[in-house]
Amino acid sequence: MVDFFSRYGSELIRLIFEHLYISLVALFLGVLVAVPLGIALTRTGKLADIVIGIASILQTVPSLALLALMIPLFGIGQLPAIIALFIYSLLPILRNTYTGMRRVNPDLVDAARGMGMTEMQLIRRVELPQAAPVIMAGIRLSGTYVIAWAALASYIGAGGLGDFIFNGLNAYIPELIIGGTIPVTILALLVDFLLGLLEKKVTPRNLISG
């Protein structure tokens, strides 16, 4: 292990930061798009099934196929990798946002409307806080997926820990394979843990006690 870090330590740190950058930008974009879209779909009736169905279809496209499809559209490097990972991040967040908002106690919604709240006030003060645990569960799941799938981004020149894994496979260097796989696993667990802490922070106290 000491020999591995002496030989590859600086490169490992660089690849970890590349991996995190690709993953977190894609996840951030997924949250930025999927949460407002999921909220909007709760007001659109049958359109929700169509949009979630399209997201589900995109989720079934094999990771490598989607990454390969990005090359003629966006070239190689980090941009196509981020776009592909962004697409993969959408479904869990979108579905959980829609589900969480739909499960809000209708009595709370009726009471808020009776108090004269506007639609935006209702969403911000009542529905979003109540749906937050379900939404965060979707973000946690998506974050774990994105960290794992980002390893494949090495195939299109995006860098990240996939460089270690695939270089190790091509040259049959086991320490590179292990040196790439273990950090990916640790990063996925760490992101899940940190998002779990955030989930507890945004969960209303009445739901925790209940």
Image (spheres, helix red, strand yellow):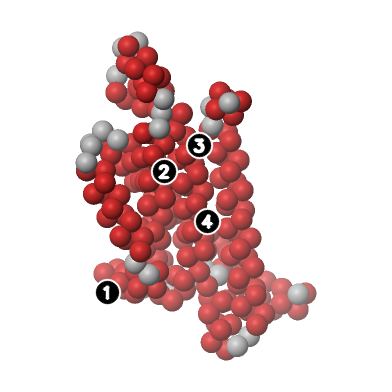
Question: Could you tell me how far apart the alpha carbons at marks 3 and 4 are, in whole angstroms?
Answer: 17 Å
Instruction: Report which residue position mark 2 lands on.
Output: 96
Give the CA separation, mark 4 to mark 1: 28 Å
Point out residue 128 in the picture as x, y percentages from the top left corner: 42, 30
Q: Which residue is at the front of the view, 183 or 126?
A: 126
Hey, what amino acid is under mark 3? Answer: Pro
Q: Which mark is residue 133?
A: 3
Mark yes or no: residue 204 visible.
yes
* Residue marked by disc 4: 144
Tell me the quarter of the image containing the N terminus. bottom right
Q: Earlier in the sequence, mark 3 or mark 4?
A: 3
| Picture coordinates of residue 66, whole percent (x, y) | 34, 69
Determine whether 57 is above or below 100 in the image: below
**What's the amino acid at mark 4?**
Thr
Disc number lying in front (2 or 4)? 2
Location of mark 1 (residue): 72
Which quadrant of the figure has residue 59? bottom left
Residue drawn 27% across and 55% down?
54
The numbered mark, 3 or 1, whose residue comes first in the sequence reads 1
The reply to whether discs 4 and 1 touch (Cβ–Cβ < 8 Å) is no
Q: Secondary structure at mark 2?
A: helix
Name the amino acid, label 1. Pro
